[in-house]
Amino acid sequence: MQVDYIIVGLGLAGLAFTKELENNNKSFIVFEDNSQNSSIVAGGMYNPVILKRFTPVWNATEQLEIALPFYADLEKQFQKKYNYPIDIYRIFKSVEEQNNWFVASDKPLLSNYMVSSISNKKIEGVIANNGFGKLINTGRIDTKILLEDYRKYLEETSKIKYNSFDYSQLIINNISIEYNGISASKIVFCEGFGMLKNPFFKYLPMQEAKGELITIYAPKLHIDFLIKASVFVLPLGNNYYKVGATFNWKDTTKLPTEEGKNELVSKLESFISVPYTIVAHTAGIRPTVKDRRPLVGKHPKYQNLAILNGLGTRGVIIAPTTAKALYNHLENNFALDKEISITRFE
């Protein structure tokens, strides 16, 4: 079997890169072993504002200009809805935060998203004594359904194999690679935190950040926007809400924990006063990098091996842009932005 590319891993990074290959009429085969689930359990929000400090997310406006049409194309391809625009209400903890909001909302990079006025409207079951700041032009991508649909599509077109990738079976030549009877010009690793077992790229400084979320049923909480306080509350429809997320740098298992659930419950009940029932509890490992920039580029020795990883908590925004950048780097010899290139660690 001969293809242009082998892709290892099909989270958001792998999906975005395979779509770039399809758009450019390149053949590929994907290896996926379902060992990484951060893209599936993620909240899937796109929001260009860091709500802790009211500062812009790195390159978010430019990234959204690529990301939103990318998801629109997928909706058209599968005749399904994945993009759900939704406003965000940030609960203020103090008058000082209100003042900081006013200052930030006047800045050019943020004024398209942050409504400058303070909202003091009363919402049943929500404790917000200092009011809210409202964000617009934000939303959620249903990453779980999107990935399920895309994997089914690859199954139907015989472009995916559900096997763990055996690095020891990879034969690297000057202009091609061989793997278990498959010949390809290049291979791209999109493995999430699985990169830590990859002998070619494990030298890169990735950290595992475990995140836990709960889904609740709250029939008396009637909101059609996301609330952000110490955790977020994201409406899913029919009185169901996703609540998250924790950050745990020590526990590297993918199993939900009682400790994580208790943390979420404690933070949720600091600003939600209506009764609710927990109906689901999930966990995933985010692939994060110390400088909070993706890991993109070619192996320093083997130029037909490449990586697309480290998207962290903002994969929905970053994945389409970095996939396009990597494709142009591999096929057209375009230089990578120094902030995302793995050469910064060599």
Image: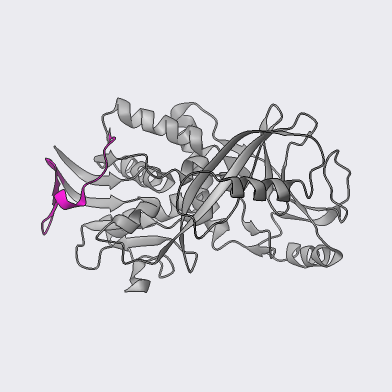
What's the residue at 26%, 38% (across, down)? 163
Task: Give the percent coordinates (x, y) of residue 294.
Answer: 43, 61
Q: Quadrant of residue 118?
A: bottom right
Magenta highlight on residue 174:
yes
Q: What is the basis of the colouring in this image?
A: one colour
Q: Is residue 67 above or below residue 326?
A: above
Observer-nearest of 259 and 206: 259
Observer-nearest of 346 and 126: 126
Residue 68: in sight, yes or no? Answer: yes
Magenta highlight on residue 171:
yes
Task: Give the percent coordinates (x, y) of residue 311.
Answer: 46, 55
Observer-nearest of 337 and 165: 165
94 horizontally vs 159: left or right = right
Quadrant of the snapshot with the N terminus:
top left
Q: Is residue 248 above or below residue 19?
A: below
Q: Is residue 145 above or below residue 299?
A: above
Q: Quadrant of residue 33?
A: top left
Q: Which residues are magenta?
A: 161-183
Task: Give the percent coordinates (x, y) of residue 31.
Answer: 28, 41
